[in-house]
Amino acid sequence: MNLFRFLRSWEFFLVVLLVVEIAVLGLINPVFFNAENLLYATLDFTHILFAALPLTLVIITAGIDISGVSIMGLASITLGLAWVAGMNIFVALAIALLVGILAGAFNGFFVAKTDVNPLVITLGTLFMFAGLAQGMPALLDKLGFKAYGSAGLAAYQYEGITGLPDEFIALTEGTVGIVPYPLIAVLAFTVLLSLLLHKTRFGRSLYLIGVNPKAAEYSGVPIRKILVWAYVLSGFGAALAGTMLTSYFTSARADLGGDALLPIITAVVLGGADILGGSGAVWGTLLAGLILGFLRQGLLALGVTSDLIQVVVGALLIGAMATKQLVHVFGEYRLNRKALFRRNGR
Amino acid sequence: MRSFLRSREALVGMLFVALLVVTGLFNPNFFKPESIVEIFNASLTLVLITLGEMFVILTRGIDVSVGAVAGLAAVVLGTTLNLGWPLGLAVAAALATGMLAGAVNAVGITLLRVPPIIMTLGTLGIYRGLMRVITGGSWIENLPQNIKEPNLWNLLGIPFFVWVGLALLALTMVLTLRVRVARYFYAVGDNEDGAYLLGLPVRWTQFAAYTLAGLFAAFAAVVFTSQIGFVSMNAADGFELKAIAANVLGGVSLTGGVGTPLGAAIGALFLTAVHSMLIFLGVPGIWDNAFAGAILLAVVYVDYRVRTALELQQRQARIRGDLWGGEPS
Amino acid sequence: MFSGVPVLKGIDFTLRHGEVHALLGGNGSGKSTTMKIISGAYPLDAGQLFLEGEPIHLDSPRSAHERGIYMVPQEPHVFPHLSVLENLGMGLPFAAAELRRRALPLLEEMGFDVQLEEQSAFLSIAQQQLLEIVRGLLRNARVLIFDEPTSALTFREANHLFERMRRLTEQGIGIVFISHRLGEVMDIADRISVLRDGRFVLSEARANLTPHDLVRAMLPPDAVTGKEEAKREPRASRSDRPVLEVENLSSEAFSDVSFSLHPGEVLGLAGLVGSGRTELCEAIVGLDPHASGSVRLAGRQLPHRTPSLCQRHGLVYVPEDRHAHGIFLGLPSLYTISASVLDRLGRWLLNERRELELGDRFVRNLNIKLNSLRQPAGTLSGGNQQKVVLAKALAVAPRIVILDEPTRGIDASARQDVYRLIRRLTDEGVGVLLISSELEEIVNLSDRVLVMRHGRVVQELTGEAIRLDRITEASFGLAPGGESS
């Protein structure tokens, strides 16, 4: 990408926004100029990024996946149950991620094999996965398996499956230098998805499907296969988010991530993806996620209540979209005016 | 038969009745009038929100803020009541709040051209936030008795609010099926360009749909506030998704222009009744969501299969007609 | 004006009471745009409209309706889930009873025989058109605009329509009739105007015109009007093994079609719009899974075809509707060019250098005018968009190319580029199946011509027999030398 184009891009605008945001927050409260604090603060919202990054791919295909918030809880509770069953915690982690992949594959097959609106499908699976996550421990308990962990039902209802081993908790506590592991994982995930999106046949096909699925079909793009993989990635990302939160909160719960839907979609849309498909990039999503996350942290630190922050985030989402629409309308208008004057001038 | 198979109301209605019968066979207590009335009573909030959402979906839009609108309207109702406003005025304020919140969505969507899902996702955050800003984050309790009373009234053994719900359902039925201007919702969702070229006020129709969704969410707020007697900060949380699910279940298509209030109401009743049915069947309530989701997916899948099978049949009939029917047209 | 591309360039158009004024022109010449401006659907960038001598300003279809201007669109705007009566009354301030009272006499006059309570999804195209006309009459329209009303009608249905149009003109209603069928236009019109590239090049009373004048006016001044070149040597001898063999292919849009295509041959496929040509081609490349019959590529039977399977066997299809099926408007032009050969640009990773080379090669070969391969395809002119779509097809290095209306809506010079390309392909031994509604194109380029009518191949022409009149006669189902239509 050449420099000039980068400077005019939405990503660059987001970079500037992020820098300005940190500067403003820092001037108000110098804590934000402390790199270690800043990086540590990301732990509160890396799960948003894990889910939002691969969701970008789904939205590029003009699809949507709102079931991720339920997959988070499902992955978390799966991990907890597997561990309670006596498995090594990392085996349990692998199983939880696998469940995320399977959940995503279910969405993907349903989307690819039918003409049902992806919003309806993932709405159905949002309820179904959440229900499974809530019901599974009770079912297993009924079957004679002590699913609630050592502390029993009362403790489970209050704080989920606790007592997870230290080496698992260390996954979110550990740092390389001052950079927390999860942030490194997010960056690695972004790089990976970005390569996938811009350098591979798969990634190119996502854009082609999003812009014109008919033309993609006529061109021989294997639409169904590509769609299934996009939703698989989304499910995997949500499972990563769920297990990361499990480690961060040191407990496995069925209702993790329930309130993450708004920030996840906001990050993707603010990151530049068009909800109608065909555009978007994971770096934009990463930057938008960071901006939103720090905004939240910053406002909290300034004593703004988390309720007002919701208002700010909602307004930001609408404002960004409205601006984009207006810029587009104005651009069309200007093009037409120019063409008219060019012609009349002759 | 074909049109019957095609009708989602029939499909879901049958499924609903079948499940009711199974539950009743399993546990005869289920057929007691009180249980049935209780199901109706419990489903009222969702039915009302679903009916409002239906207008939006008919125009091929979507509104994921209706739960938050209901919450906001409930907060306004509770706050004004505790300020000593008379009941009628407080209810009017709540309904006005709902309409205003819906109108804000409508402005963003029709004027600023923000995609509906983005606009209403944004206002979902805004309205939920405003609820807490107004109340300072605490629940509104100690509401005056006059708001709780209507919930206790009943006629012929049926609670007052069930009558209200039935009346509103009947009203929307008459509105959508008989009133000329209300048919615009269908026309706009069925064929937006066509509607514009025929001179229909497309933007105003969409505007009305979102405003009505807000108004119905406010109706729901009045009902559940009276039923439970306080306003919690997560009042009607998640109802936006349930309302969409109920509409889809009841045959209101997200592609616009198809569906009836009766179908939407059956969908909402169904989703709520799942809870009662599972309890009567001895399944713990935590499985509600799993069943609701599975039923939704099963219904849309069956619908897809029936639809494609009928289309194939029609195509083949046309081919045969062409081959044997002399000059094709 | 669309994204800075002017469609109309200063036109004057007049319609008198009680006349049928036909508007002719190739696709993309600006006919539909003119009418959409007159009917209020598109805004006017410059100029003025007058009705009965009064200047009027239209900002929406509704404002046009209020002034008695109604457009019967090419694709009738039907609400399939609503009843016929509701469809008629949509947007009108009448209650059901009043609507019925007003509509019934109109329906009877138009000979519209249908139950008003019936769901509109079951109306035929001809009935849908009548529904649109009655909608206009219910609005007391004085100006009715018909945008290619006959394109989906049978011969008989079209004649019925013309009778009704005459009856309307007797009431003083002015009718604008857009068509690309010369025979019809000569039959029904009082006056005829021809649009080309957004300008009127002809406007005359019908009595002073011959079909030949109209054809000449529609073609660019420098166009070759007959088969002026020396008849080319057939590039393929019939003894060559065919690259494409189609046997007894049938679907709902066509039946029992068989033909073969040889290497280096251009097989023209003529016939009226709606005669089943496009559907046939879609079935050949596997876009219609319900079609029956057999297709062999280079002798190999392909029962379960998909576009990508056909591509792998060297068969590509360039669809008629390039915006809907061919091009990725919002993405860089390069992405469209390479879309069909992504699998050849690397197993997993896309080789960017190779992709750019591919793009450059086609930009040079096809003379595509663009600033950079990164330029979004949507900002190119129609002709260059079509070339980008052609490049996508040719990137596969096909043995058979199916071109469906390859020159629709593109300018004269791009057209010549496409013709040159077809010649070059056949020189290289590629078999070309060419669908076109522009008969001159078929005559000039084809070695052999199949004419379709009502879903069947009714005529095969070769060599000297490939003539405009023979094709036209066959398309309309007339015996050679018989009464021309």
Image (cartoon, helix red, strand yellow):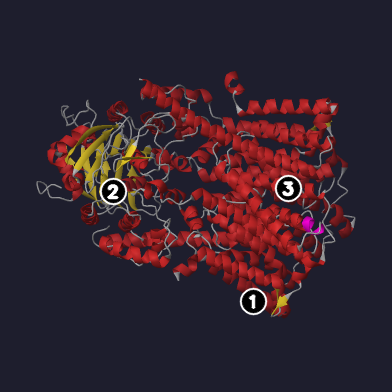
Apparent side of residue C85 relative to residue A78 in the rendered image (left or right): left
| Residue type, mark 2 in image | Ser
Look at the numbered discs 3 and 2 and tell me whether their residues touch, using CB distance below 8 Å.
Answer: no
The chain letter under disc 3 is A
Query: Relative to the observer, which residue lies in front, C334 or A93?
Result: C334
Apparent side of residue B81 relative to residue B263 in the rendered image (left or right): right
Q: Report crowding for label 3: few under 14, some 14 to 19, many 20 or more residues within 10 A (C-alpha).
A: many
Residue B67 rendering spot, x and y as whole percentages: 69, 55
Look at the numbered discs 3 and 1 and tell me whether their residues touch, using CB distance below 8 Å.
Answer: no
Q: Identify the residue under disc 2.
A: C151
Query: Relative to the observer, which residue lies in front, B76 or C157?
Result: B76
Query: Relative to the observer, which residue lies in front, B321 or A269?
Result: A269
Q: Identify the residue under disc 1.
A: B21
| Residue type, mark 1 in image | Val
Q: Identify the residue under disc 3.
A: A72
Q: What's the mark number on residue B210? A: none
Q: Report crowding for label 2: few under 14, some 14 to 19, many 20 or more residues within 10 A (C-alpha).
A: some
How far apart in space, not on screen, are marks 3 and 2 (Cα)? 55 Å
Q: Are marks 3 and 1 on the same chain?
A: no
| Residue type, mark 3 in image | Met
**Which residues are the magenta region?**
B78-82
Above-or-below relation of C141 to B172: above
Residue B237 counted in the magenta span: no
